Amino acid sequence: MTIGLLKHALHVLRQESLYRTPNRVNQWFKWLSPGLLVKRWLLLSASGVMLTFLGLAIWMKRTPVYYITQFIGDVLQTITDVLPSHVSGPLAIATGLLLVWWGQTRTLGSITEVLMPDRDEELVDLLLAHRRLHRGPRIVVVGGGTGLSNLLRGLKEYSANITAIVTVADDGGSSGRLRREIGVLPPGDIRNCLAALADEERLVTELFQYRFRAGDGLVGHSFGNLFLTAMSEVTGDLEQAIAASSQVLAVRGQVLPATLTDVRLWAELADGRRIEGESSITEAKGKIVRIGCTPANPPALPKAVKAIREADFIIIGPGSLYTSIIPNLLVPEITEAIAQRDVPRIYVCNIMTQEGETEGYSVGDHIRAIDKACGKKLFEAVLVQKKVPSARALIRYAQENSNPVPLDRDVLTRLGRRAILADVMHEDEQTGLIRHDPIALARVLLRWYSRVEGVVK
């Protein structure tokens, strides 16, 4: 056991020595990277010290400068008498550089210990990442449900300038109960997006998704929904509650409701039924021929419209077609703002059809439904999953009347859309559950954006 401990200690010491030499030097040179906004302020501080000293000397009729200069000259003369200039000069330079390096290293180390006591990253790495993310494109994503939050997890690795515009038409589950009992806008989709964009995503997601299993009136409620509801009561409305929550959770970007109006979805089915309520539409399991909301034409949140008008890249979806994506587009100002933007705009189509909403739908059917709901052409390209899921997953989903969404290229050509095929699917090996892979999806979208950005401009 003692020998094992000694070996472990030697291994740790070896790793630390390897880390402290080349890695430390590498970390130091990172501080010379342009754009960190550190070197210029250090230089400015040094210039301030010199200017202050000069001002004092002038004020005191330069007497100290004379004596200090004379003293320095005498010291230098003594040194050169003992050591030749070709030895003393380089030695003084090396000593000075060593003191500067030591002082700056200790200073930055102390700052890092205070600001990040429990983090393994170096401060310079965080500054470099901060610079890269804040220079990323201004991305607006429109949708709702798990599809949107899944996409945001990937996008936040490429840009901090993200705006998620989310539907507030949910009336089922915990959100629906809070909507009926307290009168707040449903916070469910907003909760998911805030958790996805948070710095400590895993912990925040577990906390926000936690559902109470006991307690009078608490059973079934998620902590995140209660948190946002309480924030709404404290701050005055949902918009301010989201902003305050974003600060608490260190969210990259912003999450905005499409409207602050209490809207209720309705749908007309092919069999003549008219269904009201977002959760009831899916449960009706009919073919949707028309969808709308009450009140009609709700006003958009001004910040959401502003974000669209300033966007470099607009993404619609993924998510439930009729209950997550289209509800945002029933807000006329949102639709109009997207249609007017001459920037890359793309729709991320679902991988599988959804029972009660899009049974039997092709990619073209999804696009036609969006065009019909908003009356405008909002995007020029659609992202489609390239590979078919495994046989195991297909069997699992077939039991729920769900199948892969087929690509009908001829229909897309007639609709004036371009298909972007890519493998952006993640299939859970244990459950067979199919979702978009956040990183792969974001990478493909940003790659497409970088290719077409110059063409659109």
Image (cartoon, rainbow, N blue to C red):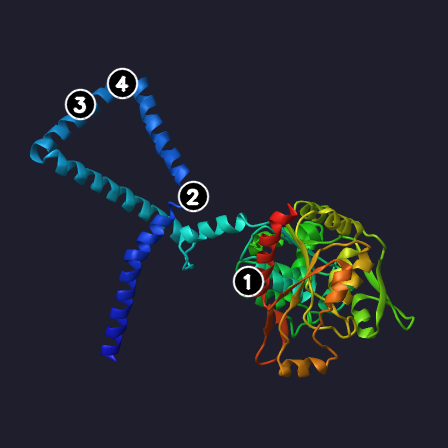
Q: What residue type is labelled 1?
A: Glu
Q: Residues within 10 Å of mark 4 (few under 14, many from 20)?
A: few
Mark with earlier residue (4, 3): 4
Relative horizontal placement of residue 424, taking residue 115 as reference (left or right): right
The residue identified by callout 1 is: 201
Residue 18 percent location from the top left of the image: 28, 61
- Where is residue 128 shown, x and y percent of the image? 45, 50
**Residue 407 in sight here:** yes
Of tags 2 and 4, the one toward the viewer is: 2
Give percent across and percent down for residue 87: 13, 38
Pointer 2 and pointer 4: residues touching (CB < 8 Å)?
no
Going from N to C along the chain, the mark reached first, 2 or 4, is: 2
Tell me the element at label 1. Answer: helix
Marks 4,3: beta carbons within 8 A = no
Q: In this figure, which residue is indicated by the disc labeled 4?
A: 62
CA gap, disc 1 to disc 3?
62 Å
Note whether residue 169 is visible: no
Q: Nearer the N terminus, badge 1 or badge 3?
A: 3
Residue at the image position 72 percent from the left and 77 percent from the top: 402
